[in-house]
Amino acid sequence: MPKVKKLNSMRLLEAQSIAYETHHYDPEIRDAEEVAAALGLPADEVFKTLVVECPSRKKPILVLLPCDCTLNLRRLAKALGEKKVALAPHARAEALTGLKVGGISALALIQKGWDVTLDARAMAVANIVISAGQRGTQLRLETADLIDLLGCRIIDVADAKGS
């Protein structure tokens, strides 16, 4: 088996003595639900990272929510005290973060000072799986460790698909 490249997100977790597991999948997969299926992981543990633009803020925020949910923009705006927020289109999200869609990770952007919102559903799972900052690699760690490390704001912002 070829040696796996160590990413900055992994180095960060190791420097903080945070235990994690690495999961690899076909980097052609961009959809988080497909990632969960490819890895055989429950959808409620695999979280996607979305870039959301807020008119009153200079910098967008990152929103993490379960891969099988959709973002409720109205509820997020209200919780943030904004009139309106907008999901950044893929090309803009990539330009803002410097990461490819399917590989955007709050851990990879920690040094950039992004505000991070985590959907409240995360509180129901002991472990969370998020992108390592590169398509094809996911990291599984304790939810509490992720919240502490990123200083996540916990808000109920996700809706089940189709609701």
Image (cartoon, rainbow, N blue to C red):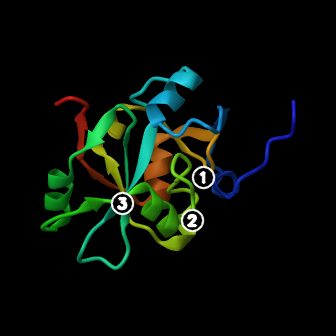
Mark earlier in primary sequence (3, 2): 3
For the N terminus, the image quarter is top right
Within-10-Å neighbours for mark 3: few <14, some 14–19, many 20+: some
- Which three-letter amino acid code belongs to the residue tagged 2? Gly
Left/right of residue 39 with respect to residue 15 in the rendered view: left
Locate residue 148 relative to residue 74 in the image: left or right.
right
In space, the residues marked 1 and 2 are separated at their CA atoms by 10 Å
Quick check: 29 above or below 52? above
> In this orientation, which residue lies closer to the viewer: 86 or 145?
86
Mark 3 or mark 1, which has the lower sequence index?
A: 3
- Judged from the image, the secondary structure of the residue bearing numbered disc 3 is loop
Near mark 2 (Cα within 10 A), the count class, few <14, some 14-19 or many ≥20, is few
Q: Position of residue 58 (x, y in %)?
A: 34, 79
Task: Please name the residue that numbered disc 1 is placed on.
Answer: 133
The residue to which callout 2 is attached is 98
- The x, y position of residue 13, in whole percent, is 63, 52
Q: Residue at x 43, y 64 (%)?
A: 92
| Of marks 3 and 1, the one in the foreground | 3
32 vs 89, nearest the viewer: 89
Quadrant assignment for the C terminus:
top left
User: Residue 88 in the image: x percent, y percent?
Assistant: 36, 60
The secondary element bearing badge 2 is classed as loop
Say if 153 sits above or below 124 in the image: below
Q: Which mark is residue 88?
A: 3
Name, please, the residue furthest toward the top: 40
**Kind of residue at badge 1:** Gly
Q: Is residue 20 visible?
A: no
Q: Amino acid at mark 3?
A: Ala
User: Mark 2 and mark 3 in contact (Cβ < 8 Å)?
Assistant: no
Q: Quadrant of residue 42?
A: top left
